[in-house]
Image: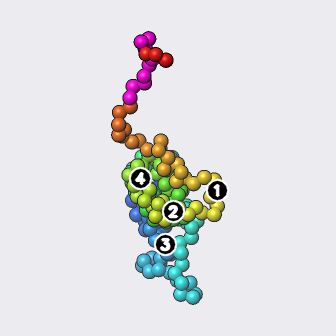
Amino acid sequence: MSGYLLLVGEKGLPLIEQLKLKNQFLVDANGKVLTDKKGRKKLVPFSETYAAMQALRFMWSYADGRIAKPRLGQSMRILLDRPKLADLVIADLARWKDWSIREPADDHVRRQGIQRPRHQGGPSCVTCWSAPRTFPRARTRKRRPARTPSMSTPL
């Protein structure tokens, strides 16, 4: 997918978004959802969705200017609706300094929690997202100047 995006640039994002990021089910060329022998809808394999996510990461890091960074962030934000990937997406968006989803991400964490994929270990990336030092914030009150003892003040 990275090769495809390198070749066609931003014009290729809508196809990847539609087939791998937005749809949770496999579709044919006409847009009809594919089913198995029992009539159940076929899910897009997790590996394909993850590969699309990796392609976005690759384009951000190594394809200087081939696709505008805000456009890559827009594509990545689509995956916030998937609980199994939201943790990874939040970490990427924080790394990319995309603060536009801070409130929705906090709400998502509070409402549903984040499900980490089985293959992912270690601390949750939501911890990184929610850390107060992660986000630039305006100061709500002025800091008092440090008091220095004077010669006339008793100790």
> SS class of the residue under badge 3?
loop
Identified by mark 1, the residue type is: Gly
Identify the mark nearer the N-term, 2 or 4. Answer: 4
Rounded to the nearest whole Å, what is the CA distance between mark 3 and mark 2?
Answer: 20 Å
Residue furthest top as drawn: 151
> SS class of the residue under badge 4?
helix
The x, y position of residue 123, in whole percent, is 60, 52
Relative to 149, 122 lies left or right:
right
Question: Pointer 4: what residue?
Answer: 102
Name the residue rendered at 52%, 48% in the picture: 128
Q: Residues within 10 Å of mark 4 (few under 14, many from 20)?
A: some
Rounded to the nearest whole Å, what is the CA distance between mark 4 and mark 3?
Answer: 25 Å
Question: Pointer 1: what residue?
Answer: 121
Task: Magenta stretch: give its range.
Answer: 144-152
Find out whether the residues at labels 4 and 3 contact each other: C-beta distance under 8 Å.
Answer: no
Identify the mark nearer the N-term, 1 or 3. Answer: 3
Question: Pointer 3: what residue?
Answer: 24
Eye-nearest disc, 3 or 2: 2
Rounded to the nearest whole Å, what is the CA distance between mark 2 and mark 4?
Answer: 15 Å
**Position above or below: 84 against 35:** above
Identify the mark nearer the N-term, 1 or 4. Answer: 4
